[in-house]
Image: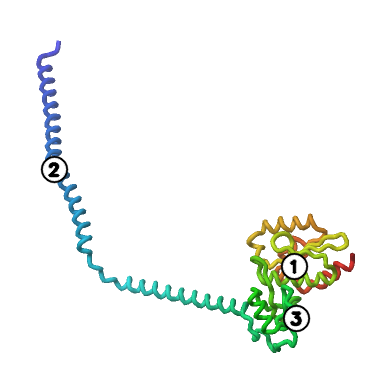
Amino acid sequence: MVNEYDLLERLVIGALVLLGVALVLAVFGLVVLIALPFAIGYAIAKILFWLYGGIRHCFFPAEIKEPTEFERNFAEMQLEFAKKQREKKRLADEKEARKLKLERTPETALDSDWKEPEKEYELSGNLHLSSSLTNRQRNELYTLGYNVIKISPFGTSGAAIYWVKTRHNESKEHAFFCYILEAELRKYTDDIRMNATSGPDLVVNWKGKQFCFDVETGKSLSRQPDWLESKFAFYQREYDRSFILVTKRTLKYKYSRYGDVITRGKIKETLRQLFRRR
């Protein structure tokens, strides 16, 4: 049997524990009851203050602060940089405009020691030496959209001025050498086909053989290397000989992997050897 004193002791301890728990709950509840109104009040005050600030900003905008010295210096630097950029762009635009004007303006001053020819020849071709033209013919070519280019056809003499007609998005340099190559090929055959949009620039039929010629200015070398690879591989398969005329000597070794490369100085010699041995 449990001793009555032990039982009494247990009852007293249990009562004290229950009393302690009740006191803790009571204190916690009291704290919550006291703090809750303050928390709600604080939240309401924050909302009201935010609304007040928004309304005040709408009706009474804040005064602009005086910029600091650093902000003023930074703003001046930005303005100066923008001014320099505008000036740089203006000079570039003027340079480009002068370049275009030089390329398209039919001025006799473009030719040194130019004299008006006594007779006019018929303007039936796509390439004309400027010194052989009269002023009337120059103006006519200008109206027809011809471009002016100063260049040496074979690199063996000083540069002369030519009027050249371009096709589609073709550059005047590319068009010039296509016509020069055509003129040299016609010394050997008239069976020549010029392509303006697809295929080699020129295709020549000669005694049952087909030769193709492509003029390269170097622009496609970095832009479309894969396309160049497939294009010249196709030419190698389809034609008996494939020739590449590069407009600059520095391009010779860059195109040598694609076929037989010709520079402007070797055009006549290459064609002479090509047609003599067949």
Looking at the image, residue 88 lies above or below residue 16: below
Outermost residue toward the right?
277
Which quadrant of the structure image shows residue 220?
bottom right
Q: CA distance from mark 2 to mark 3?
A: 106 Å
Disc sitting over residue 65 in the figure: none
Asked if the residues shown at circle 3 and circle 1 are in contact, with their CB atoms under 8 angstroms apart, the answer is no
Q: Could you say which is closer to the camera, residue 13 or residue 184? A: 184
Within 10 Å of disc 2 (Cα), the crowding (few <14, some 14-19, many 20+) is few
In the image, 180: left or right of 166?
right
Q: CA distance from mark 1 to mark 2?
A: 92 Å
N-terminal-most mark, 3 or 1: 3
Label 3: which secondary element: loop
Disc sitting over residue 245 in the figure: 1
Looking at the image, residue 2 lies above or below residue 229: above
**Residue 198: image x %, image y %?**
71, 59
Q: Residue at x 18, y 56 (%)?
A: 52
Disc sitting over residue 37 in the figure: 2
**Residue type (three-letter) at the residue carrying disc 1:** Leu
Q: CA distance from mark 3 to mark 1?
A: 30 Å
Camera-near label (3 vs 1) is 3
Which quadrant of the structure image shows residue 60?
bottom left
**Residue 189: image x %, image y %?**
84, 68
Residue underneath mark 3:
121
**Residue 218: image x %, image y %?**
67, 66
Within 10 Å of disc 1 (Cα), the crowding (few <14, some 14-19, many 20+) is many
**Residue 223: image x %, image y %?**
63, 61
Q: Could you say which is closer to the camera, residue 149 or residue 43? A: 149
